[in-house]
Image (spheres, rainbow, N blue to C red):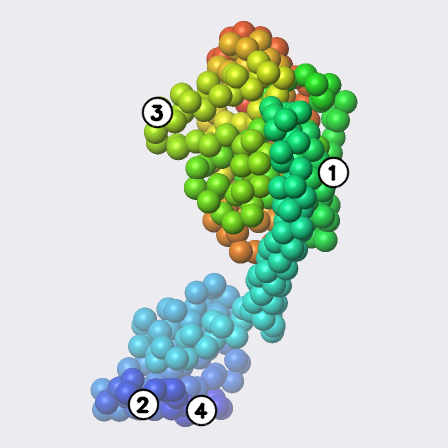
């Protein structure tokens, strides 16, 4: 004989309770292969399903809801009960909070280091202007110490291809992919006296912006053609006087880690001044501090790949070769 069970749907919100909803009767055949569902009112509606056929389908609960108008609460609860593991949401939340805490610690460490080391740069600045106006080795040494002390508690940096760096006294044009705010910290640890191209607004930041000014970073207004021309002229003048310059040819940080299209400004400078182009690939900075999420610091490590210098007097060739070289190292990761 078939077993019969009466079922009255439960609603968490009384306002959602339908007015004319009657209890359901569920009967199971003795063989256990046929299920009958009946709504107990005058115009009773019936639904018979074979367990082997229907319940093996991936969306059976949705079909039952549509065909017999089951209460939505029953369907949703059954779906949630079958997926996920206890504590998954908490693990994700804790991971996010941990990255935020690490972000606060990162900026605290870098600010404390900057305060002390900036004073050192400020005291030595008159002598730097007197004896080493263009390269500013002393300031770059201080910046290297600052960057190394800041990143050491949070991630490791592995460098490949140090032998490919030109001699310290050789002016060159360095180019790299750009993934994160951490790229500057990473590159400063190399200890080379190159001048970064930076947005003019950065120089207004207390301590950090002032330190970049003392380092001799080159200001640039991105949408101002006159500022762009002045920037390129200043780069050529620095190379002529023995200093190196550093460009991010993509122009902005990549949000997906993929290499963007290179602009030709850096390579025009290299071609006109007959200076070598040194491509550098940065790997991992975008995962630790993604673009647009500068408030977090995730766990991870950074890899710096220094490629062999590229020589030539054709800006297009230099641009294409540098882009291919950097992209090849990114693809291998």
Q: CA distance from mark 3 to mark 1?
A: 38 Å
Q: Is residue 50 above or below residue 113?
A: below
Looking at the rendered structure, which numbered label has been put on residue 5?
4
Q: Which residue is labeled 2 in the image?
A: 14
Determine the secondary structure under disc 4. Answer: strand
- Tell whether 233 sits left or right of 321: left
Q: Is residue 110 or residue 31 the one in the foreground?
A: 110
Between 18 and 309, the one lying in front of the other is: 309
> In whole angstroms, how far apart are the C-alphas of marks 1 and 2?
61 Å
Task: Tell me the residue at 41%/75% (across/down).
Answer: 75
Q: Identify the mark at residue 225; answer none if there is no mark.
A: 3
| Cα distance in 3D space between marks 2 and 4 | 24 Å
Label total for image: 4
Q: Do tag 2 and tag 3 residues touch (Cβ < 8 Å)?
A: no
Tag in front: 3 or 1: 3
Q: Quadrant of residue 61?
A: bottom left
Of the image marks 1 and 2, the number of the one nearer the N terminus: 2
Pointer 1 residue: 158
Q: Secondary structure at mark 3?
A: helix
Q: Is 15 or 285 nearer to us in this picture?
A: 285
């Amino acid at each position: 004989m078939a077993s019969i069970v009466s079922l009255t749907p439960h609603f968490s919100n009384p306002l959602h309770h339908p007015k004319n909803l009657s209890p359901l009767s569920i009967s199971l055949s003795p063989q256990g292969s046929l299920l009958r569902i009946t709504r107990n009112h005058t115009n009773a509606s019936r639904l018979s399903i074979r367990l082997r056929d229907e319940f093996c389908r991936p969306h059976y609960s949705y079909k039952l809801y549509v065909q017999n108008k089951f209460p939505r609460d029953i369907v949703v609860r059954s779906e949630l009960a079958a997926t996920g593991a206890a504590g998954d949401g908490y693990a994700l939340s804790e991971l996010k909070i941990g990255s935020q805490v690490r972000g606060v610690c990162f900026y605290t460490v870098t600010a404390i280091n900057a305060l002390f080391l900036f004073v050192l740069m400020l005291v030595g600045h008159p002598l730097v202007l007197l004896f080493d106006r263009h390269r500013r080795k002393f300031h770059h040494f201080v910046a290297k110490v600052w960057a190394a002390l800041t990143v050491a508690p949070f991630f490791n940096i592995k460098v490949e291809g140090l032998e490919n760096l030109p001699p310290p006294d050789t002016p060159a044009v360095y180019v790299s992919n750009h993934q994160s705010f951490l790229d500057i910290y990473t590159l400063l640890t190399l200890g080379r006296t190159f001048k970064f191209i930076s947005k003019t607004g950065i120089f207004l930041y207390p301590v950090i912006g002032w330190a970049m000014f003392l380092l001799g970073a080159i200001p640039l207004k991105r949408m101002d053609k006159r500022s762009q021309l002045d920037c390129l002229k200043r780069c050529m003048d620095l190379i002529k006087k023995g200093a190196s310059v550093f460009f991010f040819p993509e122009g902005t940080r990549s949000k997906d880690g993929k290499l963007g299209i290179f602009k030709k400004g850096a390579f025009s400078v290299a071609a006109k001044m007959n200076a070598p182009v040194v491509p550098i690939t940065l790997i991992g900075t975008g995962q630790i501090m993604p673009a647009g999420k500068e408030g977090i610091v995730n766990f991870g490590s950074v890899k710096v790949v220094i490629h062999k210098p590229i020589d030539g007097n054709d800006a297009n060739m230099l641009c294409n070769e540098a882009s291919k070289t950097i992209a090849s190292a990114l693809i291998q990761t």
